[in-house]
Image: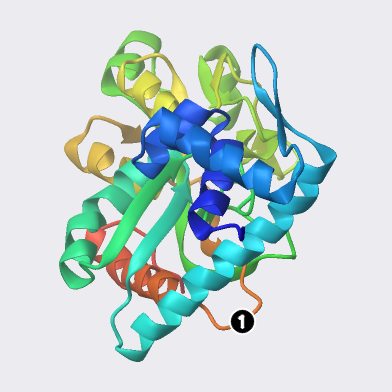
């Protein structure tokens, strides 16, 4: 008997989700149906692809080898389907997008309705991760990354940039006083990132004229968590314009050291793995995002 695409997709889903029950939810199937698909696949291949322990499923050596080919098969089928759709100039299919929580909440989410209205046949699947993810491992089509890119294997398209500023809430400044000089920050509560440490480099000149490297009093991996901490008067923070524009306009956060702040902008890129031309659904999303970022009223977000 020949293996089927459904069986291959069930196997990949189990690997990616970590369990048969989670894979069944992802596939919209019953747990027993997904388990049977996996069992049939192993029976047809006459090998064990996954070993089951009390805590998790683990790939066998044969499973590792088959997984790579299985992903290629599914990608080829999806590519063939997409090619037919592209010929009708109508992007369609599932589009998996990954971005940090702040960018997803403040930039992507407000644009979803407009994008879906224009491209109703694209099924958006949105994921938030604070760190960089392996696009292939997470089956991500496009990731939106803020900051300089390190992975040269990625194709990248710049979609804008966003300036960073030092901010604090009126409540914090009333309670602790407003710092007038950069050196005054030593006596204040500073909110910073757990990683990467480069995010704790603020656009203020230190005693040697270099960007100030701070040591956080309270730290978090999430920019949105730091924003909430600042709004609640817990300290001084340095965040990007795309997530603080409304806060500054409303007065919930005030910019400090306006004259001393260096013009430091974080590049925003859409990145994806493609050896051929960019797919229609990725192109439609990236084009829409790049064109709409300026409409958000986000200061300095559009690329120069």
Q: Nearer the viewer, residue 201 or 260?
A: 201
Coordinates of residue 74 in the picture (x, y in percent): 56, 63
Coordinates of residue 303 in the picture (x, y in percent): 45, 70
Q: Nearer the viewer, residue 209 or 98?
A: 98
- The residue lying furthest to the right in this view is 61
Quarter of the image where one finds residue 81:
bottom left
Coordinates of residue 176 in the picture (x, y in percent): 40, 11
* Mark 1 surroundings: few (<14), some (14-19) or many (≥20) residues within 10 A: few
Quarter of the image with the N terminus is: bottom right
Coordinates of residue 94 in the picture (x, y in percent): 38, 60
**Position above or below: 156 against 221:** below
Q: Residue at x 52, y 78 (%)?
A: 278
Quarter of the image where one finds residue 230:
top left
Q: Secondary structure at mark 1?
A: loop
Q: Residue at x 28, y 16 (%)?
A: 171
In the image, is 91 to the left or to the right of 134? left
In the image, is 49 to the left or to the right of 238? right
- The residue lying furthest to the bottom in this view is 87
> Can the viewer see residue 230?
yes
Q: Nearer the viewer, residue 62 or 141?
A: 62
**Position above or below: 298 against 282:** above
Q: Residue at x 67, y 42 (%)?
A: 42
Q: Residue at x 67, y 35 (%)?
A: 196
Question: Residue beneath label 1, please?
Answer: 276
Q: How was the colour assigned to the protein in this rendering?
A: rainbow
Count of picture labels: 1
Q: Nearer the viewer, residue 295 or 115?
A: 115
């Amino acid at each position: 008997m020949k293996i089927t695409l459904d069986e291959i997709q069930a196997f990949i889903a189990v690997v990616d989700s970590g369990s048969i029950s989670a894979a069944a939810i992802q596939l919209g199937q019953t747990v027993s149906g997904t388990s049977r698909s996996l069992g049939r696949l192993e029976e047809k291949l006459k090998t064990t692809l996954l070993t089951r322990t009390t805590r998790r499923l683990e790939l066998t050596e044969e499973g590792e080898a088959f997984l790579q080919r299985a992903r290629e098969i599914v990608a080829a089928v999806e590519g063939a389907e997409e090619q037919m759709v592209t010929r009708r100039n109508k992007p369609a299919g599932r589009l998996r997008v990954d971005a940090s929580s702040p960018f997803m909440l403040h930039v992507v989410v407000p644009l979803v309705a407009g994008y879906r209205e224009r491209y109703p046949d694209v099924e958006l699947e949105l994921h938030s991760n604070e760190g960089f993810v392996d696009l292939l491992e997470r089956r991500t089509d496009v990731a939106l990354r803020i900051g300089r890119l390190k992975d040269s294997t990625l194709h990248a398209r710049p979609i804008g940039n966003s300036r960073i500023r030092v901010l604090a809430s009126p409540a914090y400044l009333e309670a602790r006083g407003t710092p007038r000089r950069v050196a005054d920050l030593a006596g204040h509560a500073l909110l910073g990132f757990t990683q990467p440490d480069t995010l704790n480099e603020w656009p203020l000149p230190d005693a040697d004229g270099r960007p100030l490297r701070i040591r956080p009093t309270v730290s978090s991996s999430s920019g949105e968590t730091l924003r909430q901490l600042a709004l609640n008067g817990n300290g001084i923070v340095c965040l990007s314009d795309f997530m603080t524009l409304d806060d500054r306009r409303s007065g919930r956060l005030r910019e400090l050291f306006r004259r001393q702040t260096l013009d430091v902008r974080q590049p925003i890129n859409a990145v994806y793995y493609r050896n051929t031309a960019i797919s229609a659904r990725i192109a439609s999303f990236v084009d829409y995002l790049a064109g709409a970022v300026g409409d958000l009223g986000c200061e300095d977000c559009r690329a120069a």
